[in-house]
């Protein structure tokens, strides 16, 4: 890599370059790179802990590679994106950017690091090993044709901003207490999602038992994918109400809502070892579309 720029905030020109690279990868793979958290961190100007590493090469007027480091609760998320035309150079480009990213994390005090990779190959495993990371969790993307046969059997209401925030955070954080990315959300995390252009409270379905929030199904429509994907973005039932059929009913409610809005493919991400959720989705017709793996480790 001839030139490597390390940025803690991205000026508009650089942001456009990064977005161009991400679109080139999305066109090649049919899948937007960067996890949701990293994407929001990038688009909303970089929060504390954000570092972007931009790799350039002479003779190429586009960004060749981009590596991002973001704070995620108490750990670090890392991603590496190489331009589709330069993937044959992955074994040169990868180690340089990744080792610089690890240095950035070390200088900021170190901590637990995870790097999510779409359909990982041996090259990714070797790169991960070269920076001291090893294979960790596997995430499945599952899809289902819509409509499903099951109809929604419970009442839901749309999320009311400013009223439902606190109860929602309480249910989310209780249900995802042990989850690295989805647990420990704060008002600020929720606000950052509300600022996203896709946010639509009508697709953020809440179910109450009495006056208490018992569970929710938050959907997100990806208008820029082919086919348009209706994602179950986050779904959870408060542990107090778990195992009573609410998870199934909320999934059906979310999928029904998406289909009523013209979406014919449902999609979600789930940890491969979340057997309860995977079993539920399979029994409702979801199948695995692809998988992603986290390479994880600790930086001193
Ligand atoms: C996943 C979750 C939403 C399911 O909600 P729930 O209300 O507990 O689930 P339900 O009562 O509707 O049961 C769903 C299915 O799981 C099965 N199930 C229930 N408990 C189970 C367990 N401990 N292990 C395996 N399967 C179980 C049920 O038999 C049911 O299958 P069936 O409908 O074919 O009988 C809920 O457990 C949850 O909030 N988990 C934490 C957050 C999470 O993991 N969200 C999903 C992220 S993708």
Image (cartoon, grey):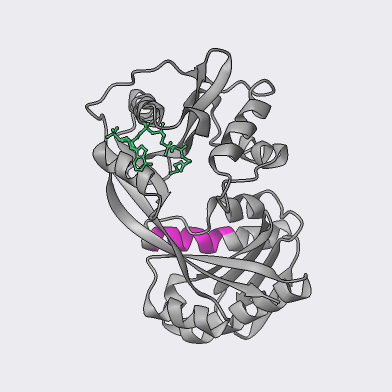
- From the top left corner, tell me how far across and down residue 182 is, in percent: 57, 46
Residue drawn at the location 32% of the way across and 39% of the way down: 280
Nearest to the observer: residue 13 or residue 267: 267
Please tell me in which quadrant of the rendered image residue 28 appears.
bottom left
Residue drawn at the location 63% of the way across and 81% of the way down: 99
Where are the magenta residues, as a range?
Answer: 19-28
Mark count: 0
Is residue 229 one of those drawn in magenta?
A: no
* View quadrant of ligand 1: top left
Please tell me in which quadrant of the rendered image residue 2 appears.
bottom right
* The residue positioned farthest toward the top in the image shown: 210
Nearest to the observer: residue 1 or residue 182: 182
Quarter of the rendering occupied by the N terminus: bottom right
- Above or below, comparing residue 105 to residue 213 in the picture: below
Q: Main secondary structure of the magenta part?
A: helix
Relative placement, left or right, of 41 versus 32 is right
């Amino acid at each position: 890599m001839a030139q490597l720029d390390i940025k803690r905030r991205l000026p508009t020109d650089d942001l456009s370059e990064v977005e161009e690279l991400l679109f080139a990868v999305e066109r090649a793979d049919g899948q937007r790179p960067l996890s949701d958290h990293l994407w929001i961190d990038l688009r909303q100007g970089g929060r504390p802990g954000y570092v972007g590493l931009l790799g350039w090469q002479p003779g190429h007027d586009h960004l060749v590679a981009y590596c991002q480091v973001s704070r995620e609760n108490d750990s670090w998320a890392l991603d590496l994106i190489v331009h589709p035309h330069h993937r044959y150079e992955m074994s040169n480009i990868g180690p340089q950017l990744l080792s610089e990213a690890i240095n950035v994390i070390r200088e900021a005090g170190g901590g637990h690091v995870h790097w999510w990779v779409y359909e990982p190959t041996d090259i990714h495993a070797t790169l991960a090993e070269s920076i001291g990371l090893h294979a960790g969790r596997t995430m499945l993307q599952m899809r289902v044709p819509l409509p499903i046969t099951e109809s929604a059997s419970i009442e839901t209401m749309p999320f009311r901003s400013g009223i439902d925030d606190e109860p929602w955070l309480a249910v989310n954080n209780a249900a995802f207490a042990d989850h690295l990315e989805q647990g420990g959300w704060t008002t600020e995390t929720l606000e950052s999602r509300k600022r996203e252009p896709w946010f639509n409270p009508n697709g953020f379905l809440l179910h109450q038992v009495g006056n208490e929030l018992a569970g929710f199904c938050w959907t997100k429509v990806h208008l820029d994918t082919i086919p348009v994907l209706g994602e179950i973005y986050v779904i959870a039932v408060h542990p107090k109400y778990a195992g009573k059929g609410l998870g199934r009913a909320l999934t059906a409610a979310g999928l029904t809502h998406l289909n009523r809005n013209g979406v014919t493919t449902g999609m979600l991400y789930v940890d491969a070892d979340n057997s309860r959720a995977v079993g539920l989705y399979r029994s409702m017709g979801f199948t695995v579309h692809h998988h992603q793996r986290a390479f994880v480790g600790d930086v001193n």
